[in-house]
Image: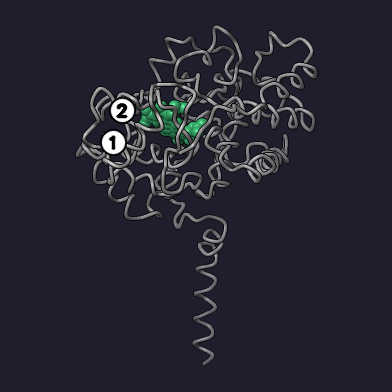
């Protein structure tokens, strides 16, 4: 009896660390998470701004609890930041010559930009000049995934903000288009250090959010893409009588606001919106992963976490590179009166676009 108690105690001691890990994260095994690149670390702000992460969590909660659909806007904003000159917060800069006017960025949500700005304003008030806009966006996107019932994971921080932004042409060259086939997607992702598995996993973000008719009308006219399920195609044609940018539909027709693996069964069922989604089933470099994630929600979340952390470290600025912007929308060199600029910017941008119609 005593012997058995002893063995049980030893077993408990041995298993305790992994049990603790299971309690804080739905990811069963954290050992294969990508290590932080040089200059980034987990808990980077633990001494310089100890409340940084909890502040992001708290403000994201206040925005997403009444309206979890806002999560999608923040997640996409982060992807568009990282793929254009790295995760340096440059997409947040509001400049007529900058990244926002570029075609793919015209459908970014103004409300997502405003949420980031609101978090940044709060952080500037509690620890001025410490937390970069690039990190605010990374942490907000991580939080958005969690709030939409996706996985919960830690993310390395320590990113610095870019001192400049890309122009429209560079944005177009770096962001994959919804009309891309698998080879174009693989080459786009590979140029950012991401592989075929990352492509399939990260595309899974299309399990939440909206798309405008203009982004997929090429699959409806002049002929209907045969990969589309007939009933689904008919309903899209009704909702999108033309390529009006003013109508948007849910990307995941099964669980539109839940960050789950339904996107992959939608691919298999011909119920996804873009060529870039459908093509993942056509190519033998991506097909097996689509099927695997369609069959297993846990496998999807596990790989999504790994791929998301990889994406979050693309071409980051660290150490003495870049700077810490005071207002995410404005380069420090152009900031005049910080307080009034933040207030007026947040007030204007928080008006959520009214044009979203959902199926
Ligand atoms: C694989 C290449 C990708 C292409 C071609 C693509 C393209 C698009 C397009 C065209 C839209 C809809 C825009 C609109 O009409 O309003 C969209 C929405 C979205 N994308 Fe992607 N995307 C890709 C990858 C990603 C990745 C890697 C993420 C994040 C990890 C992501 C997250 C999202 C989200 C969350 C939305 C919904 C945004 C909202 O509701 O405001 N996408 N994407």
Determine whether the residue tagged by mark 1 lies in a helix, strand or loop: helix
Residue at x 44% of width, y 24% of height: 83
Report the residue marked by disc 1. Answer: 278
In this rendering, the answer to whether 94 lies above or below 305 is above
Residue at x 27% of width, y 49% of height: 291
Q: Is mark 1 within 8 Å of ligand 1?
A: no
Q: Quadrant of residue 249?
A: top left
Residue at x 75% of width, y 19% of height: 344
Report the residue marked by disc 2. Answer: 185
In this rendering, the answer to whether 274 lies above or below 51 is above
Q: Residue 88: which disc?
A: none
Task: State the scheme by which the image is colored.
Answer: one colour
x%, y% of residue 262? 39, 49
Q: Is mark 2 within 8 Å of ligand 1?
A: yes
Q: Is any part of residue 37 visible from this angle?
A: no
Q: Is any part of residue 342 visible from this angle?
A: yes
**Tag 2 and tag 1, C-beta contact below 8 Å:** no
């Amino acid at each position: 009896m005593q012997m058995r108690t002893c063995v049980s105690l030893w077993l408990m001691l041995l298993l305790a660390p992994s049990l603790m890990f299971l309690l804080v994260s739905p990811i069963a095994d954290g050992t294969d998470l990508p290590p932080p690149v040089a200059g980034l670390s987990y808990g980077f702000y633990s001494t310089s701004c100890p409340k940084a992460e909890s502040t992001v969590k708290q403000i994201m909660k206040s925005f997403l609890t009444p309206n979890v659909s806002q999560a999608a806007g923040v997640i996409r904003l982060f992807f568009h930041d990282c793929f254009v000159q790295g995760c340096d917060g440059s997409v947040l800069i509001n400049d007529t010559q900058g990244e926002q006017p570029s075609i793919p960025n015209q459908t970014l949500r103004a409300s997502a930009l405003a949420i980031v700005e609101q978090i940044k304003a709060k952080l500037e008030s509690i620890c001025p000049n410490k937390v970069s806009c690039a990190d605010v966006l990374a942490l907000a996107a991580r939080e958005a995934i969690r709030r939409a019932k996706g996985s919960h994971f830690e993310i390395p921080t320590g990113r610095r903000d870019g001192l400049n932004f890309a122009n429209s042409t560079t944005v177009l060259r770096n962001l994959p288009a919804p009309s891309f086939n698998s080879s174009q997607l693989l080459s786009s992702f590979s140029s950012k250090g991401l592989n075929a598995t990352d492509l399939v996993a990260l595309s899974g973000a299309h399990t939440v959010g909206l798309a405008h008719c203009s982004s997929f009308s090429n699959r409806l006219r002049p002929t209907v893409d045969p990969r589309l399920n007939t009933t689904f195609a008919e309903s899209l044609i009704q909702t999108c009588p033309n390529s009006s940018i003013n109508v948007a539909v849910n990307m995941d027709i099964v669980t539109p606001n839940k960050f789950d693996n339904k996107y992959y069964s939608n691919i298999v069922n011909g119920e996804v919106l873009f060529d870039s989604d459908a093509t993942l089933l056509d190519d033998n470099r991506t097909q097996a992963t689509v099927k695997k994630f369609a069959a297993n929600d846990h496998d999807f979340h596990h790989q999504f976490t790994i791929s998301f952390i990889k994406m979050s470290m693309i071409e980051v600025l660290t150490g003495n590179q870049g700077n810490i912007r005071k207002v995410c929308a404005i380069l420090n060199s152009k900031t005049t009166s910080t307080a009034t600029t933040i207030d007026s910017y947040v007030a204007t941008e928080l008006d959520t676009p009214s044009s979203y119609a959902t199926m």
